[in-house]
Image (cartoon, rainbow, N blue to C red):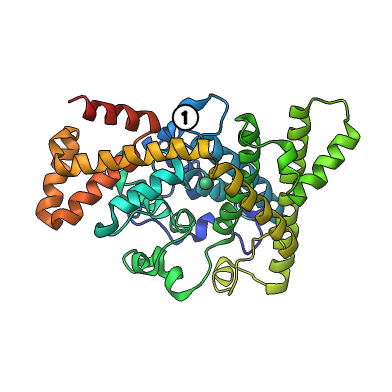
Amino acid sequence: MTSSLAPYAAFDERTRGRRFPETAPRFRTEFQRDRDRIIHSNAFRRLVYKTQVFVNHEGDLYRTRITHSLEVAQIARTVARALRINETLTEAICLAHDLGHTPFGHAGQDALNECMREYGGFEHNLQSLRVVDELEERYADFSGLNLTFECREGVLKHCSSQNARLLGDVGERFLNRTQPGLEAQLSNIADAIAYNNHDVDDGVRAGLITADELREVSVFARFHDEVVARYPATPPRRQLYETIRRMVDYLVSDVIMEAERRIAAARVDSIDSVRNQPQPLVSLSDGVLEEHQELKRFLRTKLYNHPKVRNVMDEARATLKSLFEGYLKEPSRLPVEHQALMARADAEGGEKARARVVADYVAGMTDRFAFLEDKRFLSR
Ligand code: MG
């Protein structure tokens, strides 16, 4: 398989390696090992019960973090194959990209960031890296999953320069403004293509936006017109799906063609020359990016800021805040092993380290566990 990869792909045998050296897997590639470790992690299983846009108990058909992650991986794998870059590494990065997400989606992340303001803040990308580098406890020889550098650089999509300085090799590109490998660049754009499109589906399903309203978005209107003209008697629900699949195909095709164009123009011949480019090479073309952003703006205004979504999210924010403050004040409410972590953190780093233990614990919660735990707090 490796031999069919383009020279600018990530090659298993040329990985920059793992933080703790291990013997090479016998029947798998290095990146297969990464992907398999991600799938076996506790954090991955918790994504089942974490909010994408709609809180898990609001309905069984909405995306959760795990189905979102699977859709991201599916989209990215198609592009990876077409570009002849490493499909397995791409899949691993996509499956891991949201491992650090708090319960309750972005409202949860914002709430925890506010709670952590005096203690170094909270950022879900950084937390995803923290999960795979530190927080998973499955292996005797190391904490975390000990993933390859290539996978770790993909998981860390964004990072402040302040935090980047603390991260060593994987933080360097945020300081010297270089790029990650193409597989990492791809997972980033696949994430956006996935959520923009599945949120249209979920938003309409929830009755918070309608196909009629969506027609103010030019890319939606164009494909919707095409579908309605071709299938006038088909139920609106199916017309919507047909529209969404056309939008996904349009965006994915554009990413492939634009990346091919940029790769050819930049004449990259290795992952290191990809890293040294001034701009990412995997991207939507300018015109399509503009259309994609129009859809994104629509979703922000009409769906993510819909009063019904905001009400649930306000409640969620309050829940996380109350949990965070409760544990920090009364560590005896934490599970026994976290109390031990708290005591150690206190000895080593005082209040700041204690707050990080609480943030890690709260961030790891599923939606329903957070709600239940908060009720338990209040009932005492
Ligand atoms: Mg995502």
Q: Which amino acid type is marked by label 1?
A: Asn
Residue 50 lies left or right of residue 276; in this view the side is left
Residue situated in front as seen by the camera: 74 or 367 = 367
| Residue 344: % across, % down | 12, 48
* Residue 192 left/right relative to 117: right
- Extreme residue in the left direction: 347
The outermost residue toward the front is 307
Q: Which quadrant would residue 266 be assigned to in this image?
A: bottom right
Residue 177 in the image, given as x and y percentages of width and height: 49, 73
Is residue 141 visible to us here? Answer: no
According to the image, label 1 marks what residue?
56
In terms of depth relative to the viewer, which is nearer, 219 or 176? Answer: 219
- Name the image quarter holding the C terminus: top left
Residue shown at 18% from the left, 50% from the top? 354
Point 54% across, 50% down: residue: 89
Residue 42, by quadrant, is: top left
Residue 50, position as x, y percentages in the image: 44, 35
Position of residue 256 measured from the top left corner of the image (x, y, whole percent): 72, 56
236 vs 113: above or below: above
Taking 2 as reference, is 51 above or below it? Answer: above
Q: Is residue 210 visible?
A: yes
Q: Is mark 1 within 8 Å of ligand 1?
A: no
Q: Secondary structure at mark 1?
A: helix
State whether residue 339 is above or below residue 282: above
Residue at 74% across, 48% down = 216
